Image: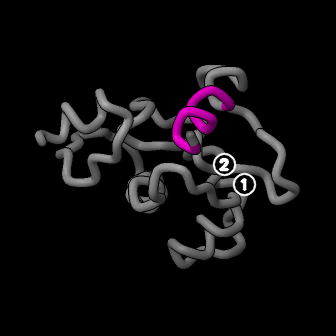
Amino acid sequence: MSALRALAAGLDAPDLPVDVHGTVFQARVWSSLREIPAGETRTYSEVAEAIGSPTAVRAVARACATNPVALVVPCHRVMRRDGNLAGYRWGLSIKAALLASESA
């Protein structure tokens, strides 16, 4: 199955080549997000730790907020530490729907 077909089917496509422009830090965050399996979530703190910058929680949140390619870089899989949904560029209802579809 091609990477594009996998995305269309709601599956992960971590091998899909992406040419997204951002800072080195944003690229590290976005790369880390692409490693989160469908149906799983991480907190902003966990992502910060995963990229080796445990104190950069706010910067991770900002990188998620500036992600220009939804689904390819699944920033919808990042949650607040208390488990609540936090800001999502395309709206919290979309984030909730994506998470629900992935856990089904």
Q: Position of residue 26 (x, y in %)?
A: 46, 52
Name which residue lies at 55% across and 46% down: 63
Residue 58: which disc?
A: 1
- Name which residue type carries label 2: Ala
**Pointers 2 and 1 in contact (C-beta within 8 Å):** yes
Disc 1 secondary structure class: helix
Magenta stretch encompasses residue 101: yes
Residue 93: which disc?
A: none
Question: Image quadrant of residue 48?
Answer: bottom right
The secondary structure that most of the magenta stretch takes on is helix
Q: CA distance from mark 2 to mark 1?
A: 5 Å
- The residue that label 2 is drawn on is 61
Name which residue lies at 29% across and 27% down: 8
Residue 34, compared with residue 21, is above or below; it is below
Magenta highlight range: 96-103
How many other residues sit within 10 Å of disc 1, few (<14), some (14-19) or many (≥20)? few
Q: Quadrant of the N terminus?
A: top left
Direction right: furthest residue: 82
How many other residues sit within 10 Å of disc 2, few (<14), some (14-19) or many (≥20)? many
In the figure, is residue 95 to the left or right of 2?
A: right
Residue 93, compared with residue 3, is above or below; it is above
Residue 97, compared with residue 64, is above or below; it is above
- Asked which colour scheme the image uses, the reply is one colour
